[in-house]
């Protein structure tokens, strides 16, 4: 055995040991001037929830309930992003429109029928996010009319990957404020303009 290493003293856990160091009921306080990254769901630490393109509306809804989220990424078997589906997609007008145009039954609708396809998704680059404040993200959400903002990062081997997500619901909860969203912006330029 290597003599450079020591056996560290250890003890039995006591009754009432908390999982985190925060006191019960204590919440981390955020304000609009804090770094945006501090409130982003970081996919390097939290695996994003996803579904398949063939998942039915009922399966999507159940997974959202089970995971406690209102957005699922739609991916292929290689984890390549195809699109995303939100709570509003399954309970809004998309299923009604799909049935009017294609017929069938609601329970036969799949994620691929109502998801926002990859070519219609927009995201912020991580380098901009690292320089932004929470207030910048809130303003971006307000002006773009989006409840979620995706964040991407170019990987060293070339392809870009999702690196995070901002959720208006999470920001509202953490800042104890309501974000009033404008009607949705038409282009990504509108979204980027809000951050600069």
Image: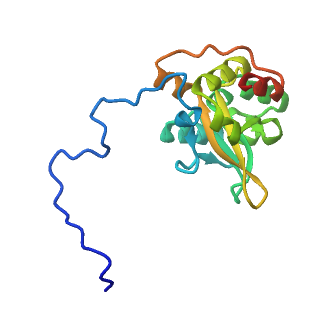
Q: Position of residue 75 (x, y in %)?
A: 70, 50
Which colour assignment does the render follow?
A: rainbow
The C terminus sits in image quarter: top right
Q: Residue 8, relative to residue 99: is it above or below?
A: below
Query: In the image as oriented, which residue stretches furthest toward the front?
Result: 4
* Count of numbered tags: 0
Q: Quadrant of residue 16?
A: top left
Compared across the picture, whether 194 is left or right of 70 comes to right
Q: Residue at x 71, y 60 (%)?
A: 78
Q: Nearer the viewer, residue 57 or 87?
A: 87
Q: Residue at x 66, y 19 (%)?
A: 139
Q: Position of residue 42 (x, y in %)?
A: 57, 44
Q: Is residue 55 visible?
A: no
Q: Residue at x 52, y 50 (%)?
A: 45
Q: Is residue 29 visible?
A: yes
Q: Quadrant of residue 118?
A: top right
The N terminus sits in image quarter: bottom left
Q: Residue 85, relative to residue 3: is it above or below?
A: above
Q: Residue 103, relative to residue 186: is it above or below?
A: below
Query: In the image as oriented, which residue stretches furthest toward the bottom?
Result: 1
Q: Residue at x 17, y 61 (%)?
A: 11
Q: Position of residue 99 (x, y in %)?
A: 77, 29
Q: Position of residue 132 (x, y in %)?
A: 64, 31
Q: Quadrant of residue 125?
A: top right
Q: Nearer the viewer, residue 72 or 14?
A: 14
Compared across the picture, whether 181 is left or right of 187 comes to left
């Amino acid at each position: 055995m290597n003599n450079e290493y020591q056996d560290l003293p250890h003890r039995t856990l006591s009754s009432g040991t908390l999982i985190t160091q925060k006191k019960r009921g204590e919440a981390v306080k955020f304000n609009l001037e804090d770094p945006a990254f501090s409130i982003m769901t970081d996919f390097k630490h939290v695996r994003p929830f996803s579904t398949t393109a063939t998942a039915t509306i009922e399966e999507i809804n159940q997974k959202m309930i089970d995971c406690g989220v209102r957005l699922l990424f739609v991916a292929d078997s290689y984890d390549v992003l195809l699109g995303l589906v939100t709570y509003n997609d399954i309970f809004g007008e998309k299923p009604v429109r799909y049935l009017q145009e294609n017929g069938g039954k609601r329970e036969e609708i799949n994620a691929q029928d109502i998801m926002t396809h990859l070519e219609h998704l927009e995201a912020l680059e991580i380098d901009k996010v690292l320089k932004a404040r929470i207030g910048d993200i809130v303003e971006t959400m307000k002006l773009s009319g989006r409840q979620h903002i995706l964040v991407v990062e170019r990987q060293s081997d070339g392809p870009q990957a999702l690196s995070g997500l901002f959720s208006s619901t999470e920001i509202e909860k953490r800042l104890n404020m309501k974000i009033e969203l404008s009607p949705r912006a038409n282009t990504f330029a509108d979204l980027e303009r809000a951050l600069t």
